[in-house]
Each structure stands twice: as C-alpha cells, then as structure tokens.
Image (spheres, rainbow, N blue to C red):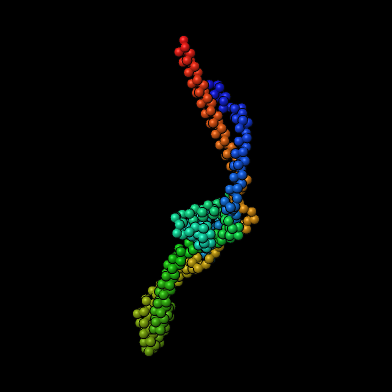
Amino acid sequence: MDEKQVNSYSSKYLCKLLVKYRKPILVILAVAALCAVIFSAPYFITPLYKSTTVVYPTSSNSTSKVLISTTYQSEKDIMNFGEDEQTEQMLQVMNSNRVRDKVISRFNLMEHYNIKPDSKYPYTRLNKLYDSRIKFRRTEYNAVKITVLDSDPALSAQMANDIAEIFDSTMNQIQKEVAVKAFRLVEDEYNALCAEMAKLEDSLNTLRKLGVFDYESQVEMLSQQLAVELGKGNAQGIKNIQSQLDILAEYGGASYAINERLDNDRLQLSLVKSKYEEAKMDATQDIPRKFVVTSAFQAERKSYPVRWIIVVVTVLSTFLLLIFCIVAYDRSRHFFCHKAEEGAASKAQERKTATR
C-alpha cells in the first residue's frame, strides 16, 4: 500500500467521514437508543430481583464422635466453621440433583417459569432457567453465597433462605443413609452379644442351683473342711464334703470357662455399647450442617435488566457498526469512481489514437 492509501485510514480521515455523515449517524444513534429504552421495558424483558444468603459449613460431619466419644481425638469442633474440604462438599451437595429436585418441587418452578409439561424439552428448559437464576459461589472467606434471581422479590428471598434449609436436610439425609446401615450392623452385634451373655448367665444360674458358685474358693474351703473332718473322724461330714467336691469336680471346669467367657464378653460389650450409642446418635439425631451468617431479604429494586447499560451498549455497538459501514461505503465509492475514471481515460485514449 502506498502512502496515500495508508493515510486514507488515519484518524483525520475517520473524523472527516464522521463530520460528513454526522446527521444520519446522529439520527441512527437516537433511533437505536430509543429502541433500547423501549425493548428493555418490563413489557419486553421480565425484571428480576436478586436475593442472597451466605452460609458456612460446619467443621465436623460426625456428631457422635465430637459429643460422646471418649477415644476420638480431633481439633474439629461442632461449633467451628468448616474449611476448604467442607466448603467443597457444601458446593457439591447444593449443585446436586437432590437439592435441585427439592427446590423445583417445593416452589413448583415448572409452573412458576411458565413451562408446560407437554411442551418440547420441558425439563431441559427448566434446568437451564434454574442454572441461570440460582447460583452458588464460594467466597474468598470459605463461605458459600447463594444467589437467587426471580421476578417475584418475596419469592426470591424465600428461595434463597429455603435452599440453605434444603441443603441442611439433604446433608442429614445423605449421611443418615450410611449411618442407619452402620447402626443396624452395630445393633445386631450388640443384641447378639447381649443374647449370648444372657445364655451364659442362665447356665451359671443352673450351676449355682447345684452349688457351684466360685470353683477355686469353694475347692480350697472344702479341702480345708475335709482335712478337719478327717482329723475328727466324722464319717458323715466327710461324706457330705466329698459329695460337694464331686459336684465341683464335675461342673467346676464348666463354671470356670463360663465365667472367663463372661468376663471377655463384658469387656467386649463395653466397647460395642459405646459404638452402639455413637451409631444410634448419628442415625437418629438431626443437627444443623451450616451456619447462616447473612439471611436473604426482599429486594426493593430490580437487579436485571439495567436499562442504562443496555442503552449504552446498544449505542456503542451501533456507533462502531456505523463506522465500519461508512468506511466500507466510502472506500467502495472511491473504488468505483476510480474505475470509472480509468475507463473514461482509456476510451479517450482510444479515440485519440483512432483520430491519428
């Protein structure tokens, strides 16, 4: 490109074009601004109101270990705010289908968003609207911000607050699915151990009726008495003591084994009982899984659309498009004029040559 062509696209050249076509440019920009004002009105674009709730997750997911366990050692406390891991878990649960389906069902969003169930792809449209109007974002302080946009400001605030509660119930429900199964296993083991100990106690009661109480101490005491009776030569006393020793000889080993087994079972029962109590608390108790630090309130002004932004963007876009169109028009006009001049010059040259 030569110097003339380069300079033709300079700022001076553009300013000349803008001055030359200033009237149509101003008219078109005014029309664009007017159209932007008209088409951003509530009749064409539904105004949306924004409500936000800020929540923190709890630091621990196991209530029983924090509250009643004597062996669990951790720095996590049920009253502490959660950190990165708990915040990520909260975001995953809030974005899950469980929370989505509960929110859609509770607020009847299919009808609220004017989506007919028999229309084409109703659930796809519903999910897109849900994702565009309900958002969850992690803040720089490890909290989760729930933002809801809706045409009804009261409903927007209610949805933002209820989503926090829905998360709470969903988190408890998810954990209970595991906790209940774990509780059933521990309960079965606890009941089986109690039943076994009851059978052993029944066996000991039967042996006690036969006179077997404490095998070792009874043998020692009867042996001493037998020696005394032998020294006295008391045949009837010797016979009575010997009969008791025979019973101890027959049932004493069983009594000793049952007592040893009971001691082991009692130790095992104390361990299982602590697990049983922890599992029962996890399976039956509901506790909050979040701390609400900012509750949503009814917005007084709409958040969308912002009309002045729409007008400014429309005017700027139109202005840039006009510059492109004017430059293209001017260059094409010069191009065709230049071609016409070249054609006229060539014809004049031809006539001049023919005359000679």
Q: What residue do we see at 62% from left, 58% from top? A: 298
Q: Position of residue 46 (x, y in %)?
A: 57, 53
Figure quadrant of residue 153 = bottom right
Q: Position of residue 53 (x, y in %)?
A: 59, 56
Determine if residue 203 is in view.
yes
Q: Nearer the viewer, residue 332 or 139?
A: 332
Q: Nearer the viewer, residue 244 or 25?
A: 25
Q: Nearer the viewer, residue 69 or 52?
A: 52
Q: Residue furthest top?
A: 356
Q: Nearer the viewer, residue 5 or 205?
A: 5
Q: Position of residue 161 (x, y in %)?
A: 58, 60
Q: Residue furthest right?
A: 300
Total number of numbered labels? 0
Figure quadrant of residue 316 = top right
Asked if 227 appears above or below 8 in the picture, the reply is: below
Q: Position of residue 300 (x, y in %)?
A: 64, 55
Q: What residue do we see at 50% from left, 23% from top? A: 340
Asked if 97 appears above or below 354 in the picture, the reply is: below
Q: What residue do we see at 49% from left, 16% from top? A: 348
Asked if 3 appears above or below 191 in the picture, the reply is: above
Asked if 41 appears above or below 287 in the picture, the reply is: above
Q: What residue do we see at 50% from left, 65% from top? A: 282
Determine if residue 52 is in view.
no
